[in-house]
Amino acid sequence: MNRKITQIFHSGELEAQNTFNNKTEWSDRAVSAVNNLYRETIDEDKAFFIEGREFFFISTSDNDGNCDCSFRGTEESNEGKQQPAVIVVDHKTLVFPDYSGNKMYNSLGNILVNPNIGILFIDFSSALRLRVNGHAEIINNQNNYKDKWSTAKRYVKVTVNQVFWNCTKRIPKLA
């Protein structure tokens, strides 16, 4: 699918590109490269990377744009087995658990009023990072994914709008 540059970047991103990089001119070749980079689905390599992470970060915001960034990680099941941090259900959907926490519900409260979500997966050993943007929905039925997460209180289902490998610069390489 060959999208126009205005279907990939929003008006603020395009304005920033024009303001801070006066060389930004989107040739047909560059648009093709951006189309290839900014995907709308999760392929097999990205699914493998996502499901291999023990943690990730999410970003949500309320109706007024007030942002919240949160860490999401794994915990052991009732049987003492490590549970996955996230699963890829299909090429457009991923799900992660919501465990008991500080009872402030910042992320879940934001999702209730604004379903937009950004997710950042990082592998510090290989200095790779993958970004996923999409729409989140709270699944409040504890039985839906009980086989994956026995200790979860609920789940967050994300419908993917955009997925892409992000620049590897400045990621500390940790063993």
Image (spheres, rainbow, N blue to C red):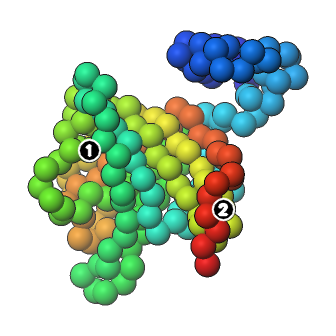
Q: Is residue 104 left or right of residue 14?
A: left
Residue 130 image offset from top left, x and y in percent: 60, 50
Mark sitting earlier along the chain (2/1): 1
Residue depicted at 32% across the width and 59% down the height:
97
Residue depicted at 76% across the width and 34% down the height:
36
Q: Is residue 152 left or right of residue 36?
A: left
Residue depicted at 61% across the width and 64% down the height:
172
Callout 1: few (<14), some (14-19), or many (20+) C-alpha neighbours within 10 Å? Answer: many
The residue at which mark 2 appears reads as 127
Residue 57 image offset from top left, x and y in percent: 42, 53
Callout 2: few (<14), some (14-19), or many (20+) C-alpha neighbours within 10 Å? Answer: some
Name the residue type under label 2: Ala
Residue depicted at 50% across the width and 50% down the height:
120
Name the residue type under label 1: Ser
The residue at which mark 1 appears reads as 107
Q: Nearer the viewer, residue 122 or 88?
A: 122
Q: How far apart are labels 2 and 1 at the CA level?
A: 27 Å
Residue 72 image offset from top left, x and y in percent: 36, 59
Q: Is residue 142 left or right of residue 80?
A: left
Q: Is residue 56 left or right of residue 15?
A: left
Q: In which quadrant will I find the C terminus? A: bottom right
Q: In which quadrant will I find the N terminus? A: top right
The disc placed on residue 33 is none
Using the rendered view, name the quadrant where residue 82 is placed: bottom left
**Could you tell me if residue 158 is visible in this image?**
yes
Q: Nearer the viewer, mark 2 or mark 1?
A: 2
Using the rendered view, name the quadrant where residue 84 is placed: bottom left
